[in-house]
Image (cartoon, helix red, strand yellow):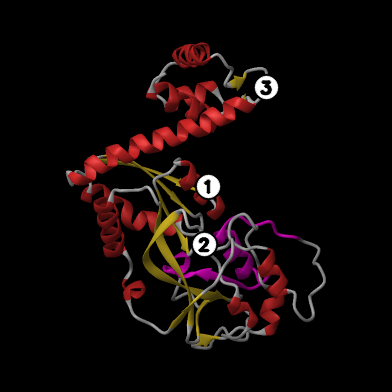
């Protein structure tokens, strides 16, 4: 049994497809198949049920793969420890990031990050909050950039910055000319949501449903993009609250309004598993991202952190009180 074989079965479990797994492992598909067969013959059990489409681990295979992940995490931890002791920034770094942040933040810092750590290879993947947590626990990613706190004791969180929320108003909104915005009861009823798996959740919907609730309209929106959400608001189809970075280039358009103090914000953090040891890398990454942030995000302001359970989006602000 070799570490290479363990990496093969973990990748195969992740992809559930021989060709894709072989590509990720930089090996031919026949080579991957032979290594899997050799491992199964050595331990005397089938790890994958090849009759299933898509490919699926056997019951004992699931247990073997989980232990293989732990072994590989421990090996990576040893390698990271050595690299960290040498203050050597090189190798691969798998970064996960939430979709409500990725399109706006990544272009700001990725080039500077590559220049700051030229021997590192960065692999960036968008995932939902809960998927990022699962991937951190399973060792599929090294670092997540996401809203915190996660409430997960097996993870370590390092706050990068606080991102304010802003109101996004339609052209006929009565507060469009106001300097700042305070939540109105009517806006609660017209609030447009992203689909649950991204940020908003059942608790948010419950809060919006207090009091009278508008009857369902003819159209129901299953939205997975902040840009789609903003365009619906521009078409006077609702009201939205969005993260500041998503409108940083639209602040003069008139549709965006800052909340009255205290401004609702979310903590954006680097999150790693509790076994992550590359402290120097985190410090370098944190400093690089901070230096690339727009100036308004570096200013002190009156604010309140927004609470969440499985969502990085605000909850209490919708109740209209502190």
Q: Nearer the viewer, mark 1 or mark 3?
A: 1
Query: Which residues are drawn in magenta?
Result: 220-249
- Let me know if residue 242 is in the magenta part: yes
- Name which quarter of the figure residue 207 lies in: bottom right
From the top left corner, tell me how far across and down residue 185 is, in percent. 69, 84
Residue at image point 65% right, 57% down: 195
Name the residue carrying label 1.
134
- SS class, disc 2: loop
Instruction: Answer few, some or many: residues within 10 Å of disc 1's Cα (few below 14, many 20 plus, some between 14 and 19).
Output: few
Residue 221 in view of the camera? yes
From the top left corner, tell me how far across and down residue 181 is, in percent. 54, 85
- SS class, disc 3: loop
- Let me know if residue 116 is in the magenta part: no
- Name which quarter of the figure residue 203 lies in: bottom right
The reply to whether callout 1 and callout 3 are in contact (CB within 8 Å) is no
From the top left corner, tell me how far across and down residue 151 is, in percent. 52, 62
Q: State the separation of the CA atoms marked 1 and 3.
A: 24 Å
Name the residue carrying label 2.
151
């Amino acid at each position: 049994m070799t570490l290479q074989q363990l990496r093969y079965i973990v990748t195969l479990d992740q992809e559930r497809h021989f060709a894709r797994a072989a590509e990720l492992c930089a090996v031919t598909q026949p080579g991957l198949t032979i290594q899997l067969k050799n491992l199964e013959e050595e331990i005397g059990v089938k790890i994958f049920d090849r009759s299933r489409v898509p490919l699926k681990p056997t019951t004992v295979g699931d247990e073997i793969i989980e232990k293989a992940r732990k072994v590989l995490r421990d090996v990576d931890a040893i390698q990271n420890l050595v690299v960290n002791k040498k203050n050597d920034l090189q190798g691969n770094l798998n970064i996960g990031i939430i979709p409500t942040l990725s399109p706006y933040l990544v272009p700001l810092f990725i080039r500077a990050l590559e220049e700051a750590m030229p021997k590192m290879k960065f692999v960036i993947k968008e995932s939902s909050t809960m998927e990022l947590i699962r991937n951190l626990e399973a060792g599929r990613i090294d670092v997540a950039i996401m809203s915190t706190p996660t409430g997960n004791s097996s993870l370590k969180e390092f706050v990068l910055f606080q991102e304010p929320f802003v109101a996004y108003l339609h052209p006929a909104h009565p507060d469009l000319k106001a300097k700042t915005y305070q939540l109105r009861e009517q806006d609660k009823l017209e609030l447009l949501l992203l689909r649950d798996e991204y940020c908003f959740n059942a608790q948010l919907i419950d809060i919006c449903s207090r009091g009278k609730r508008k009857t369902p309209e003819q159209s129901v929106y299953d939205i997975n993009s902040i840009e789609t959400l903003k365009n619906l608001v521009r078409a006077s189809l609702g009201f939205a609250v969005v993260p500041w970075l998503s409108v940083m280039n639209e602040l003069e358009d008139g549709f965006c309004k800052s909340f009255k103090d205290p401004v609702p914000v979310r903590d954006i953090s680097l999150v790693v598993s509790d076994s992550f040891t590359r402290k120097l890398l985190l410090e370098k990454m944190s400093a690089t991202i901070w230096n690339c942030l727009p100036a308004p995000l570096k200013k002190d302001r009156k604010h309140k952190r927004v609470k969440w359970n499985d969502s990085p989006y605000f909850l209490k602000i919708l109740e209209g009180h502190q």
